[in-house]
Structures are given as C-alpha cells and as structure tokens.
Amino acid sequence: MVRVLFLHPDLGIGGAERLVVDAALALKERGHQVSFLTNHHDSTHCFKETADGTFPVHVVGDWLPRGLFGRFYAICAYLRMLYAAIYASFFMPQREKVDVVVCDLISVCIPVLRFAPHRPKVLFYCHFPDQLLSSREGLLKWLYRLPINWLEEHTIGLADKVLVNSKFTLRVFQDTFRRLSTVPDVLYPSLHTQYFDQMQKKLEQRSALFDEPVHPRVPLNAFIYLDINRYERKKNHALGLHSLRLLGDMLPANDFKRCRLIIAGGYDTRCMENVEHFAELEQLTEELKLQDHVVLLRSPTDEEKCRLLFAAHCLLYTPENEHFGIVPLEGMYCSKPVVALNSGGPTETVVNTSTGFLCEKTEKSFGGAMHQLFRDEQLRVKMGDQGHKRVQQKFSFQAFADRLNGIIRDLVPISKESSPKKTE
C-alpha cells in the first residue's frame, strides 16, 4: 500500500478533474490509500466521488483571492497552489504524511514538495502546457507571463516523473519546453466504465432511458445531437450551432423539426467567461433562429449526463487542437458515433469513418457529417458498436489502472513501501 495525495487547484467539473478522480479510483482499487488536497471544493459543483465520502478531501487556501481587479488569475492560482504545497509539506498532520504526491495543471508546487521533510515522490501530469492556454494580449501580457512561463518549465523539470495525456501533447510538450531533458510518458485518460454500466442498468430499471424525455423541450422522437463541454469560448460551441443551422437548410422541414442540439456544459458563476459565453450562445441561438432546436444546460449532474449520453444519437466534439478530450471516449463507450475536429487528441481516439467522423473546422464539413448520420441509421449503429469496442480494447479502465499502479510502485522504493505505517 502506497499513500498517495492528489494536489489539485479546484475540484470542480471538467476533463482534468475527471482524470484525477479516475486516477484516484484506480489507485484505491489497487489497495492504495488515496486523499485529495485542494484550494476549492464545492460539494454542489463537483464529481460525486469527491463529495460522497469515497475520498477524504481537505481544502486549504480558499480564502486567498482567485484574481485581482478582474485580472492576474494566473499569479493568484500559483500563490494559492503554493499555499497548498506548503501546507502539504510542513503542516499536514504526521498521520497523513504521504509517499507520493500527484499534481497537475500548476507545477509551481513541485519545488516546495521536494523540500518536504518526509520527501515524497512527485508525479506531475501535464494535460497541456499552461503557457499555451493563455491568450496573447500584447506586450504587457507577454511581460506578465514571462516569469510565469519560466517557472512552469523549470518546476516541471523537478518532478520525479512526468506524464502527458496523448502523443499530441507529448509533441507540444517537447516543442514548448526545449530546455528540459525530461521525456514524459504517455498515459491516456480512461473511463471508469463500471460506473457507466451501473448507471445504464439503473436507468433501464427505472425505464428512464426510453420512456421519459431527457428534457421538457426534447420530445421522445427527437434526433439528439449532444455537445458536452465547459462554457468556454475555446470549446467552440458556436461551430455546433452554425452546423445545425446548415443542417436545417439541408433537411426537409419535417425532418429538421425532430432535430435537437443539447449543449451540456460545466458552468461556474465564479468564472466570468462561463457566464459571458453562455449569454453569447443564447444570443447566437436567437440570431440563427434555432430557439426551438437548441437546449443549453448548465452543469448537469453525473446521472443527467449519463441519461443524455444514452439518449443521444450522435456526439459532437467541437474544440480545436484539444490536448486529449475525455468526452469522445464517453460517447464511444455509450455506442454513439462522434463528430470531432481533425486535430489534437481526437485524432488518437476517434477513427475516421469507423467510430465517427474527423472534420474540418467548417460548418460545411461538420454539418455534412451530422446530415449523413441523421440519414443513415445503419451507419450510426455500426459506428456506435465499433466505438464501444475501441474503448474496451484501447482505453479500458483496467489497463489505465494497471499502468498507473505500476508507475506509482516504481516511484516508491520497496523498502519504503513495505515499511510499517504510523496510524496514530
């Protein structure tokens, strides 16, 4: 048994959060002692495993500001994470001392962890270089980001082990951090497929899959296109809306009347972009005259999300150059064809014309795929079956858990792992 602490800035709802929760589940199933330390945790806006007692979750530093004057979010996030790392290293009760700290998103905590008296091993999971996620806004922004970017590169290099989520991210990592000799390993995210199986059985027993509409504005005979992603501009939800408008021009009126696009996105009132972008999508829906065909949902629960996945006919994935993207795997496991952009992580998960379509960033390309799937039920079923099998074969939770367990055991020396643990 290895004592593992996950150090994560905000245990909300998102792809990064889903990954660390799944990683924690994988290690717990392998007999390790797992806990979380975070700057923020809202039990009403999180994955259920962090709120139902599955894992101990300790919150520190939430009193520190998330931003100053509507800016400086990066430096504030770094300071909040430093505070958490200092607590983990020097003030955590002795009985809670850990062997391995798994951190992600913010690497500035790594040097502090390396100086901890009990010297835990540090595993850093790089979803994508943070400096590439920051918008370019002129000289002042460049000067502001300069020391932050320097810190990111040099602190990642201090980790005992670095993982990335795809071959695409590996190439970007090596192109971005040229001064590092570190060569990360690729550990693809996975799904806790047992949860999806249990949820499907639960919904079927309640007859909630086929006998109840998933939303009051979605009739039972609707053809559902589902788009799951946070309400952020880079997620490119607008492409789905424009493609749906084009689909309306391609289909007979009676057919298009059945079509619904459901956008189910993570939404946090503390995040101004979430609030603004949701309003922008509402406005765009009206401009395109799609009010009767579009449903915008904010932060659906895990059960609501599963109902949507099982009820949908097709999954849309609109971000460009997404570093991995767990949603296509969720769609494929639920036997749904996936329409995604031909860039980034989806090129490693979605097989074009087999488990879905990889499209160009145009409504003509995207809408054409949507039209083909609407018209060809046999193709939808075939792609759904092949997608389900692909997740089982290539991205199984069992393989993910085995690989992560091996990495953790390699990090912890045998003598330390087998030594008696203080339990008082």
Image (spheres, grey):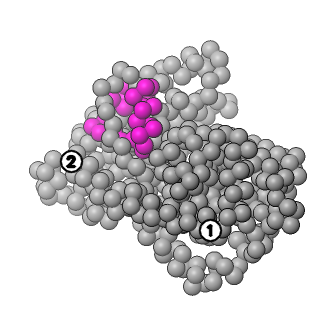
Residue annotated with mark 1: 378
Magenta stretch, residue numbers? 151-176
Q: Quadrant of the N terminus?
A: bottom left
Counting from the top left corner in percent of width and height, residue 360 is at 64, 40
Kind of residue indicated by mark 1: Gln
Q: Residue furthest left?
A: 415
Callout 1 environment at 10 Å: few (<14), some (14 to 19), or many (20+)? few
* Mark 2 element type: helix
- Among the 4 quarters of the image, the one containing residue 314: bottom right
- Assess whether residue 377 is covered by the magenta stretch: no
Of 186 and 350, nearer the camera is 350
Q: Is residue 108 left or right of residue 71?
A: left
Kind of residue indicated by mark 2: Asp
At 81% across and 50% down in the image, what residue appears?
A: 245
Counting from the top left corner in percent of width and height, residue 242 is at 77, 46
At 29% across and 53% down in the image, what residue appears?
A: 403
Numbered label attached to residue 118: none
Residue 322 in view (yes/no): yes
Callout 2 environment at 10 Å: few (<14), some (14 to 19), or many (20+)? few
* Mark 1 element type: helix
Counting from the top left corner in percent of width and height, residue 102 is at 35, 46
Q: Is residue 163 left or right of residue 253?
A: left
- Among the 4 quarters of the image, the one containing residue 126: top left
Q: Are marks 1 and 2 in contact (CB under 8 Å)?
A: no
Q: Nearer the viewer, mark 1 or mark 2?
A: 1
Q: Quadrant of the C terminus?
A: bottom left
Residue annotated with mark 2: 410
Q: How far, Cα to Cα, is label 1 from label 2? A: 47 Å
Q: Is residue 424 left or right of residue 371?
A: left
Prevailing secondary structure of the magenta residues: helix
At 45% across and 37% down in the image, what residue appears?
A: 169
At 48% across and 73% down in the image, what residue appears?
A: 197
